[in-house]
Image (cartoon, grey):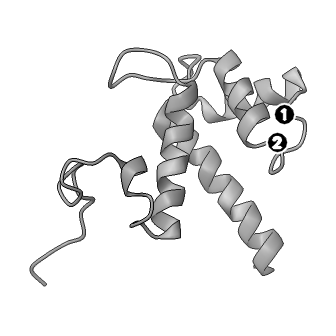
Amino acid sequence: MGQSLQPEPSGERSGGRKPAEMAGEESELEQGLCVIVGSFYRYATGPPGAKALDQAAFQNLLSNELSHQLTNTEVEAAVTRTFEKLDANKDQKISFDEYWQLIAWICQVIRRRDYNE
């Protein structure tokens, strides 16, 4: 009962290499997790430690990255409703934690759709 699972700090296992440089060594799941995180940061703005998506960045992310999983990604009213639902603290930004709620919801939809659960 001595050890718990903890994510490895960047570079600890990899000898300082970035995740993209290790892609051949990672499992498909590990690669997918890196893609999910990277997608957020590709669209997020702000200072380190406080990056977030404003509504325009959120719409771009949905249109460019999730248009096959979500419908109406080009309809501003639909995007606004989704943005407002995810913006738990009502600061007009989507933090990574708030973005993660969208990812979890999409995973649930995929599970029900593809695995009949």
Neighbour tally class for label 1: few under 14, some 14-19, many 20 plus, Cα within 10 Å: many
Please tell me which of labels 2 and 1 falls first in the chain. 2
When the figure is inspected, residue 61 is found, relative to residue 35, above or below; the finding is above
Secondary structure beneath dot 1 equals loop
Between the C-alphas of marks 2 and 1, the distance is: 6 Å
From the viewer's perspective, tell me whether residue 111 is left or right of residue 86: right
* Relative image position of residue 71 (x, y in whole percent): 89, 43
From the viewer's perspective, tell me whether residue 74 is left or right of residue 79: right
Q: Residue at x 13, y 84 (%)?
A: 1
When the figure is inspected, residue 90 is found, relative to residue 114, above or below; the finding is above
Neighbour tally class for label 2: few under 14, some 14-19, many 20 plus, Cα within 10 Å: few
Q: Residue at x 86, y 21 (%)?
A: 76
Find residue 73 and name its label: 1
Between 11 and 44, the one nearer to me in the picture = 11
Q: Nearer the viewer, mark 2 or mark 1?
A: 2
**Splitting the image into 4 quarters, where does residue 75 fall?**
top right
Q: Amino acid at mark 2?
A: Ser
Between 45 and 102, the one nearer to me in the picture = 45
**Splitting the image into 4 quarters, where does residue 72 fall?**
top right
> Do tag 2 and tag 1 residues touch (Cβ < 8 Å)?
yes
Can you identify the residue that label 2 sits on? 67
Between 69 and 100, the one nearer to me in the picture = 69
Quadrant (top left/top right/bottom left/bottom right) for the C terminus? bottom right
Q: Residue at x 69, y 63 (%)?
A: 108
